[in-house]
Amino acid sequence: MKKVKKDTIDINRLPKKPTWYLRPIIVVGAFFATLFSKIKVNKVNCENLKWPYILICSHAAFLDFIMNAKMTFPHHTSYICSIEEFVGREWLLRGIGAFPKRKYTKDIRVVKNSLHVLKKQKNTLSIYAEARYSPSGTNERIDGAMGKLAKTAKVPVVMMITHGNFLHQPQWDQKHPRNLKYEIDFKCIATQEEVETLSAEEIQQRIVDNFVYDDYKWQYENKIKVKSKYRANNIHNLLYKCPHCGKDYAMDSKHTHLWCKECGAKYEMDVYGRLHCLTGEGKFEHVPDWYRWEREEVRKEVENGTYRFEDTVRIEKLSVSSKGFIPLGHVKFVQDIDGIHLHGTLDNGEEFHFDNDPINTPSIHIDYNFKKRGVLKRGQTLDIDTLNDTWYIYPQTENRVVTKIHLATEALYDRAERELKK
């Protein structure tokens, strides 16, 4: 009888131990991938560190996984992975000891699988707590339950922050990688003895206090030159709002320059990642400062009740079999104070309606060039996840809105959480 291939990844299935024959492939691959790279490693409080532990990692580029393999050699850790990364390849997901999760969902199955890895398999669990590549080279918000996980598992907590990965290949311009050195901070922030005595809240606070990084600050302080002529190329996708005239989506960029199409303000990025205004007094020299200012501007709109974004979007559904991404059609997308709303008629004639309360979405995953599947093949997208479905949303009229949608999603969640506590 012919075996019928299943159409979904079984999220309820317990994770396997990493397959023995994949370990040397990963290790050898990591060796050659970083053979000509200069990597400085700073190990702190790791003298008596014993396997297993929870390894919380920064996430800026694919190189993070390679650095992980180098730092944990000769062992091989298990991973919590986003479900779309292994479309049609569940055998590989299971083979590397990973188990799937849909982004920014509160799924008790993830806790069950994590404890199975840590307590039953006695294997280290790697967690990329931001659940996405950092868009700005700085830390994004992280899950608030990792302290509880560590307390329940009774294992040490280790932090791995990698500097340089973001600068090598920024999220907003992955087409032009840059050559530079890297630095890894590998620090045990809570020993097993401390985990047993500290409360879950105290462990979580240590995680939050230590999960801080800024690649642009690290670059400037260490005088690391990025000589690529593309060092500011496409950065307008991140720095979308002009700090001079206040216009949204007016910024544009190419090579080393960034400018406003509305008021003409123009900046140049130097080899150390600093911004210099060429048309008068500058507002920002440090890229993350500009990004934080945009975050606060969006928060103001949310708090005063004026925030709203509306567009026609193309929608695809993720099928985690070999089918991959299934086009559904075009619908109306609205994000306002009440959350995200998707309504319209799909290509097959069915009505599609989805309303997502802000309290259900602490953050949202965005991508500036997702498999070149977006409008004009530039691929800007955001994905919305529930426990059972993932939809990919491609704005059709304005192609640099996803950063603001991401910032608004977090501000809306904070507002909803505050109201709920009242």
Image (tube, rainbow, N blue to C red):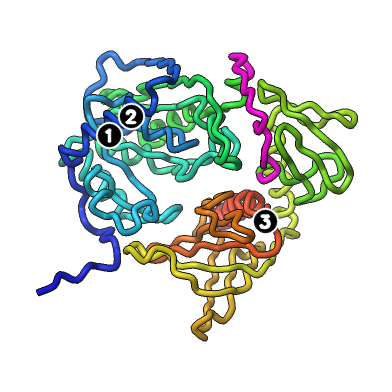
Choose top left, top right, bottom left or bottom right for residue 229.
top right
Q: Residue at x 44, y 69 (%)?
A: 326
Name the residue: 33% across, 37% down: 126
Label 1 Cα neighbours within 10 Å, binned few <14 / some 14-19 / many ≥20: some
- Disc nearer the start of the sequence (2/3): 2
Please tell me whether residue 302 is drawn above or below residue 185 in the rendered image.
below
Expressed as whole percent of the image width and height from the top left, the position of residue 224 reads: 59, 17
Q: Which residues are magenta?
A: 220-237
Please state which of the two labelled residues, at mark 2 or mark 3, is closer to the viewer: 2
State which quadrant residue 72 falls in.
Answer: top left
Residue 310 figure quarter: bottom right
Is 391 colored magenta in this rendering? no
The image position of residue 237, as x and y in percent, is 67, 46
Q: Amino acid at mark 3?
A: Asn
Q: Which residue is mark 3?
A: 399
Quarter of the figure with the C terminus: bottom right
**Residue 255 place in picture, x, y as percent:** 70, 35
At label 2, counting other C-alpha atoms closer than 10 Å, the crowd grade (few under 14, some 14-19, many 20 or more) is some
As measured in the structure, the alpha-carbon distance from the residue carrying label 3 to the one carrying label 1 is 37 Å
Identify which residue, 305 or 158, lies in the foreground.
158
